[in-house]
């Protein structure tokens, strides 16, 4: 659950939804040492009621408190927007789903060419939440046909996954009335009945989803979508199946769903010393990040390698080799 302090922390550290054009992060003296540069650094997060936003605020504070860098976290539309603006120099670190990051480094999906990006580390997993109104008569993704569904913010990882789920279920363009809404507007639409269902990809628990089940739990339900694992893996091999436990959202019950790893991405031109220092910091200060959000408990040096075709930044590789000794 979110604490009042965590929410206040994220709100304090968050900037506007778009970052300013930035110069390359300055190199630390020595270049390849495991020491962070000095100066300013920006972190692209996600929707204000999602985990990226809160955990990104915590990460910004950890960086500012333990290095010569002054970090700020920005609310964004999430993965696709984050990586596009990371590549263009608007941000220095970006939260992203691994499927979107794989598209970015391969030049697929929303990316016209391969981007010069790499990972600091894999962090926690995102769970795909497919939530429907009980009065909408939706028992599967196939039943989205003819319904009004929120597929997430434009240029978000949620939107990527939602569109791939619809494709995997055999539905065609025009079968679904898609509403490209952020999480706050999506939850409002579920509450007032203006949308029939929603897709959300986020860590556990997600505050906006907790709010929905707390206030309207008798009207909505989570769907099991594990039957779409095989066609989803054909699109991108990073997808897995795992359970959202019954304890996660009061009254929702346990369901199996599609899971996607999250990664922290940087440009390849970040100096090795800074990448090394930031990677070590994430693991050294894991307990502080856990205070901000429970999803940080999943951060594990033994599972820090980014899934193919995403590569680790050389500085991050150096840090992990030292941490795993």
Image (cartoon, rainbow, N blue to C red):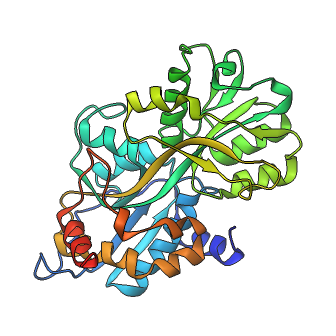
Residue 228: horizontal and vertical position, in percent? 54, 29
Count of residue discs = 0
**Residue 70 visible (yes or no):** no
Viewer-side residue, 3 vs 300? 300
Whether residue 230 is situated above or below residue 24 in the rendered picture: above
Say left or right for 225 vs 59: right
Residue 60: horizontal and vertical position, in percent? 45, 73
Identify the residue shown where x is 70% and y is 43%: 185
Q: Where does the C terminus fall, quadrant-wise?
A: bottom left
Residue 24: horizontal and vertical position, in percent? 22, 63
Quarter holding residue 316: bottom left
Quarter holding residue 177: top right
Whether residue 225 is situated above or below residue 63 in the rendered picture: above
**Residue 32 visible (yes or no):** yes
Identify the residue shown where x is 39% and y is 65%: 42
Say left or right for 61 vs 106: right
Identify the residue shown where x is 65% and y is 70%: 7
Q: Where does the N terminus fall, quadrant-wise?
A: bottom right
Residue 242: horizontal and vertical position, in percent? 56, 47
Whether residue 268 is situated above or below residue 152 in the rendered picture: below
Quarter holding residue 318: bottom left
Identify the residue shown where x is 74% and y is 44%: 187
Viewer-side residue, 36 vs 131? 131
Farthest right residue? 218
Viewer-side residue, 94 vs 203? 203
């Amino acid at each position: 659950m979110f604490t009042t302090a965590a929410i206040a922390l994220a709100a304090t550290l968050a900037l506007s939804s778009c970052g300013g054009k930035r110069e390359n992060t300055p190199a630390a003296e020595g270049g390849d040492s495991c020491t962070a540069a000095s100066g300013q650094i920006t972190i692209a997060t996600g929707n204000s009621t999602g985990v990226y936003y809160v955990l990104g605020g915590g990460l910004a504070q950890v960086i500012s408190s333990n290095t010569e860098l002054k970090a700020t976290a920005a609310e964004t539309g999430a993965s696709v927007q984050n990586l596009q603006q990371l590549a263009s120099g608007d941000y220095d670190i970006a939260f992203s789903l691994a499927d979107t990051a794989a598209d970015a480094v391969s030049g697929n999906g929303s990316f016209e060419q391969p981007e010069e990006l790499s990972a600091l580390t894999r962090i926690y997993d995102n769970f795909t939440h497919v939530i429907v109104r009980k009065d909408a008569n939706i028992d599967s993704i196939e039943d989205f046909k003819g319904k009004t569904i929120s597929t997430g913010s434009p240029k978000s990882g949620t939107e990527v996954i939602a569109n791939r789920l619809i494709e995997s279920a055999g539905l065609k363009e025009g079968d679904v009335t898609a509403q490209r809404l952020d999480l706050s507007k999506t939850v409002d639409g579920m509450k007032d009945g203006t949308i029939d269902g929603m897709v959300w990809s986020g860590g556990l628990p997600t505050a906006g989803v907790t709010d929905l089940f707390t206030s309207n739990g008798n009207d909505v339900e989570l769907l099991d979508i594990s039957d779409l694992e095989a066609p989803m893996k054909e699109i991108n091999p990073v997808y897995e199946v795992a359970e959202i436990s019954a304890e996660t959202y009061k009254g929702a019950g346990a369901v199996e769903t599609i899971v996607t790893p999250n990664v922290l991405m940087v440009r390849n031109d970040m100096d090795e010393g800074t990448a090394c220092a930031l990677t070590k910091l994430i693991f050294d200060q894991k307990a502080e990040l856990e205070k901000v959000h429970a999803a940080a408990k999943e951060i594990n040096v033994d599972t820090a390698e980014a899934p193919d075709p995403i590569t680790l930044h050389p500085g991050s590789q150096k840090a992990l080799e030292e941490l795993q000794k």
